[in-house]
Image (spheres, rainbow, N blue to C red):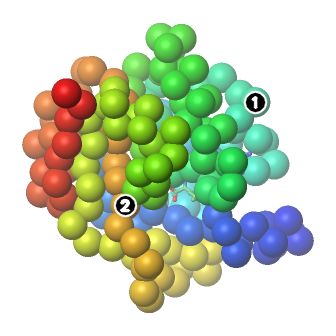
Amino acid sequence: MTKNILHSSKTTEWYTPPHLIELARKVMGKIDLDPASNNVAQKWIKAEKYYTIEDDGLTKIWTGNVWLNPPYGNGITTKWIDKLLEEYGSMVMPEAIILVRPAVSSRWFNTLAQNFVRCETLFRIRFIDANGTEQKSPAHGNVLFYVGKKNMGTFVEVFDRIGVISRPI
Ligand SMILES: C[S@@+](CC[C@H](N)C(=O)[O-])C[C@H]1O[C@@H](n2cnc3c(N)ncnc32)[C@H](O)[C@@H]1O
């Protein structure tokens, strides 16, 4: 493991547990791209294509169905959400499911909430670290957004089982 990854493990090396990835796959059929990823999480995400910190997913074109659990930190999540919205607008990325913190006072969160359906989880997600160990005491709940139109109904049906669904007015 490189020094860089060790350094970032303090902040962004928390991976989505397989049971949530399966729900995303149920909605979109398959995951074509995970633009913020690593080799460990890909053992169960199994995206057709993925980018790591070395590739820098922010500099690539995103195509197909996207799964995004972006790196977080001051001013970082917002770059990923801006990129996601740019790619969604370009029409080559028809849909995405994204997993984020409930950052209700952030501009990026409010932009998503005003435009896309979301699921606020009823439980705190136990993320998985780079060694495959589950988080013991997650500090907060999470929110998943469905960015797209095609499978919005399926997203509501599937994610209603694990959280509260909210739609923009
Ligand atoms: C919160 S983790 C999510 C990983 C995986 N997508 C998942 O859902 O479990 C964010 C990942 O993005 C990676 N990352 C950080 N900066 C990146 C960049 N510029 N391009 C691609 N990946 C990046 C981190 O190393 C980390 O593995």
Identify residue type, mark 2.
Asn
**Residue in the image at 42% along x and 86% along y:** 137
Identify residue type, mark 1.
Thr
Q: Tell me the SS state at disc 2.
A: loop
Q: Where is residue 62 in the image (x, y as percent from the top left)?
A: 59, 26
In the image, 117 versus 110, the foreground residue is: 110
Q: Write down the quadrant of residue 141 in the picture.
A: bottom left
Q: Where is residue 100 in the image (x, y as percent from the top left)?
A: 45, 53
Instruction: State whether residue 60 is above or below residue 24.
Output: above
Classify the position of the C terminus by image quarter. Answer: top left
Considering every residue shown, the one lying at the far bottom of the view is: 136
Instruction: State whether residue 14 is above or below residue 115.
Output: below
Disc on the earlier residue, 2 or 1: 1
Whether residue 29 appears in this view of the structure is no
Q: Name the residue under label 2.
A: 142
Q: Is mark 1 within 8 Å of ligand 1?
A: yes
Q: How many marks?
A: 2
Q: Position of residue 138 (x, y in %)?
A: 43, 79
